[in-house]
Image (cartoon, rainbow, N blue to C red):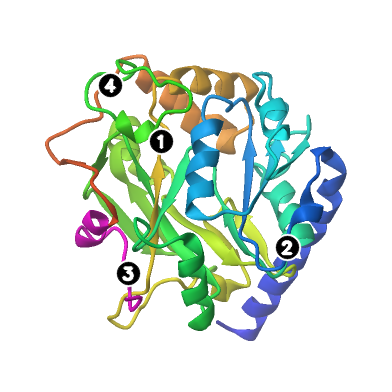
Amino acid sequence: MGILSSYQLRLARKRWRIRAFRKRRELKPVADRTGAIRSGDLLLFSTLRNEKVRMPYFLRYYRDLGIDHFLFVDNDSEDGSREYLAAQPDVSVWTTRASYKRARFGVDWLNWLQMRYGHGHWSLVVDSDEFFVYPFCDTRPLRALTDWLDASSIKSFSAMLLDMYPKGPFGEHAYREGTDPFETAQWFDSGNYTMSKNRKFGNLWIQGGPRARTFFTDAPERAPALNKIPLVKWHRDYAYVSSTHMLLPRGLNLVYDEWGGEKASGCLLHAKFLDTFAHKAAEEMARKQHYANSHEYRAYQEGLAASPDFWCKWSEKYINWRQLEILGLMSKGNWA
């Protein structure tokens, strides 16, 4: 990368950080327990709206992994999400009625909270329907992974978003609050993915899976990106650029090996396609707060009207992380 390009990216990072600093005024604390955060604590950051049905299992899952403190931005929920989270002893919550779209789909809000509270901590940024799996996650806590990353001088860790889905017509199986969503959404696409490199930011760009083949059949290039870098040893000078798809400085995006080896990576099991999603898609279409005039949610709403069955003859039933490694969807690299 040339000197001019590097300078332009430094200016862009400064601009995103200034923007996040300004957006802090949109956040009102509901329950601020950040004084309890200790040096070395593992932190989770997330933005949500009307996700109370997911929260009991979400919190239990990440507590079991080893998250010490949760920091949420509630975007004007109406279903009790904010009140539920505020009652949790290891959770800090801010609320806002401001535009999700004008906050760059929540990125500005979380960039600010990470600047303020994440400096020096391993920070995991996920949505309420994303569940992080990594090599040896069935036997080793998240701190074992971050300790190894520290010892290896690795500051960022990637995870491919893996869309999970049930077998049978959409909506046939009801999700119950507090239960494991993957008791219902047990299947995923073992292939059907494309990959390219973003020359400007250096990150990989991955698309495909059930969303591409079901909702974007005629325009697969418009399918959602599946590449994410959710786990970072945060520094106040860092900034996410687009969701957790890429961040600055640019070197944090180099989470893959171009010279024949494999860097360790994980997956985010994506529990989007529960029976609750039809209502969510209709709500988000009405709000018009998503990217490109909500074209993604328009495709969902139109496609779900036919009660599609995502399952196909190439679907794989999820077993564990080792299965994902065998399929090449994640890697333990040289972490033994």
Which residue carries the number 3 mark?
332
47 is higher (above) or lower (below) than 267: above
Q: Earlier in the sequence, mark 3 or mark 4?
A: 4
Taking the spot 67% from the left edge, 28% from the top edge, the residue there is 84
Which residue carries the number 4 mark?
308
Which residue carries the number 2 mark?
38
Residue range highlighted in magenta: 322-336
Residue 86 on image: x %, y % = 73, 33
Residue 168 on image: x %, y % = 22, 21
Q: Are marks 3 and 2 in contact (CB under 8 Å)?
A: no
Q: Looking at the picture, tell me which residue is in the foreground, 144 or 229.
A: 144
Residue at mark 4 to residue at mark 2: CA–CA distance: 47 Å
Q: Amino acid at mark 1?
A: Ala
Which residue carries the number 1 mark?
271
Single out the mark in the foreground, 3 or 2.
2
Q: Is residue 312 left or right of residue 305?
A: left
Residue at mark 3 to residue at mark 2: CA–CA distance: 29 Å
Taking the spot 33% from the left edge, 38% from the top edge, the residue there is 164
Q: Is residue 128 visible?
A: no
